[in-house]
Image (tube, rainbow, N blue to C red):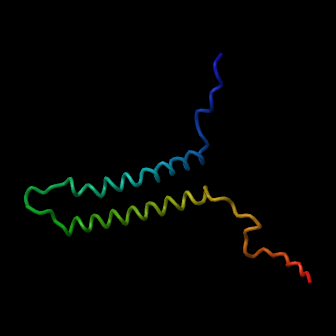
Amino acid sequence: MRPPHSPQFLARGTYRIRRLMDAARFLPILGLVLLLLPLMRHDHGTDAPPTAVEGVYLFLVWIGLIVAAFVMSLGLRRTLDPPETRLMRRDAPRPAPDEEG
């Protein structure tokens, strides 16, 4: 007898969240590769690499990684944070303390 198999496709929202989580996990690896790229390149025409160009490249990669992480965190925050309850709201009335005497 065959075991029942699960549906072949996931819900669209769940699929997107999982892919966003996968991208967030892959971001440090991508950043490491992009930051090490200038070390692998060597210009045979000169003795020294162009320091100014590599410095600009490193800062652009660094800023790009920060922006990518921020955008991914916004997408994940909406889905992974617990919903706000009435007890946590600041504008909710607080019960008066009992005055004992």
Q: Where is residue 56, by image quadrant?
A: bottom left
**Residue at x-position 38% and y-position 63%:** 64
**Residue at x-position 48% and y-position 48%:** 22
Q: Name the one closer to the observer, 24 or 12.
A: 24
Image coordinates for residue 24, horizontal then vertical, percent: 47, 53
**Residue at x-position 9% and y-position 55%:** 44
The residue most toward the front is: 101
Image coordinates for residue 14, horizontal then vertical, percent: 59, 46
In the shown orientation, is residue 63 left or right of residue 50?
right
In the shown orientation, is residue 48 left or right of residue 59?
left
The answer to whether 38 is drawn above or below residue 56 in the figure is: above
In the shown orientation, is residue 74 left or right of residue 4?
left
The residue most toward the top is: 1
Q: Quadrant of the C terminus?
A: bottom right
**Count of all numbered marks drawn on residues in the image:** 0
Image coordinates for residue 7, horizontal then vertical, percent: 62, 33
Image coordinates for residue 42, horizontal then vertical, percent: 15, 55
